[in-house]
Amino acid sequence: MRRAGFTLVEIISAVAIMAVLIALLVPASTDYIREGRKAKEISAARKLVAAYLTYASDHDGQLMSGYGGSGDPTYQPGSVTDAMGAPLSFPADARYPWRLASYFDYDMEAILFNGNENALKDQVDFHYAASVSSNLGMNVTFVGGDYGGSSDLAPSERAFRTFGQFCIQRLGQAERPSELIVFASARRTVKDVGFFKVLSPYFTGRRWAGSWDPNSAPEATGYVDFRYKGKAVTAMLDGHAELLGFDELDDMRHWSDQAEQNNNPNYSLQKVITIQQ
């Protein structure tokens, strides 16, 4: 007469098979989620740079700054509102996300966050969080400008006399808009996805680490986050978006119009030498 039930060997074998299947399925599921987020971020990058270019078209070619402040022709305190028409205060109204929001119909979650739940969970600080924590940071130093208190160098007549036209402020100034970064995948801290700005590998000297380490502080690569298997989503001034890796974004010709003009991938800001006659 046969006994009902399973033997210990059969149970152990079944558990082992389940463990193997789980081990195979979890990475596949993780990759599927990552691929979905990547596709959404590429789409968001295209829409974001399209909004940025529409703003420029509406303002006679003037490019919006990434962080507004004194001397900024694109920033008017008190003029920025949320989707309900409520005026925003500084500094939320100074950063590009809210100033550009009306150009993508205030679709903050789809365009700026794409699954970055941490930016949305605290509704009390939503305006501030939305201004800081965009998945896509802006190349504020060399495109549009950064007029904030901690900026690399704010655009001004004096700065241009000293360093030349280091920051393009109009569409027609770009040597190769298809190569010039406006937005890129960003991370402010190791734990928190998103930051409103990204910084170039060189400024007056080298400031990036020599390679990308996912465990390093985001500052090591200028807040650029190579979160898609070593690549970051980038949006260029001609309106297209693509994935680029560390070696490609380590090239200053993607960041600075002066670097492109000088064909110098290691370009650092240099003072203009005036020869007295």
Image: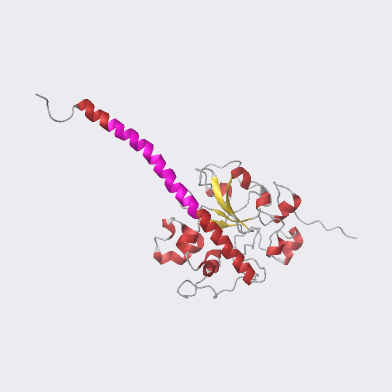
**Picture residue at 47% right of the left edge, 65% below the top:** 107
Q: Is residue 264 visible?
A: yes
- The verdict on residue 28 being magenta is yes
Q: How many labels, in total?
A: 0
Q: Is residue 195 visible?
A: no
**Picture residue at 46% right of the left edge, 60% below the top:** 110
**Picture residue at 66% right of the left edge, 47% below the top:** 251
Residue 43 at x, y percent in the picture? 52, 56
**Residue 95 in the image: above or below residue 220:** below
Residue 263 at x, y percent in the picture? 74, 49
Viewer-closest of 151 and 101: 101
- The verdict on residue 236 being magenta is no
Viewer-closest of 227 and 58: 58
Main SS class of the magenta portion in the image: helix
Write down the quadrant of residue 19 in the picture. top left
Give the side of residue 276 with respect to residue 15, left or right: right
Give the side of residue 6 with respect to residue 226, left or right: left
* Magenta stretch, residue numbers: 15-40
**Picture residue at 62% right of the left edge, 47% below the top:** 249
Q: Quadrant of the N terminus?
A: top left
Q: Quadrant of the C terminus?
A: bottom right
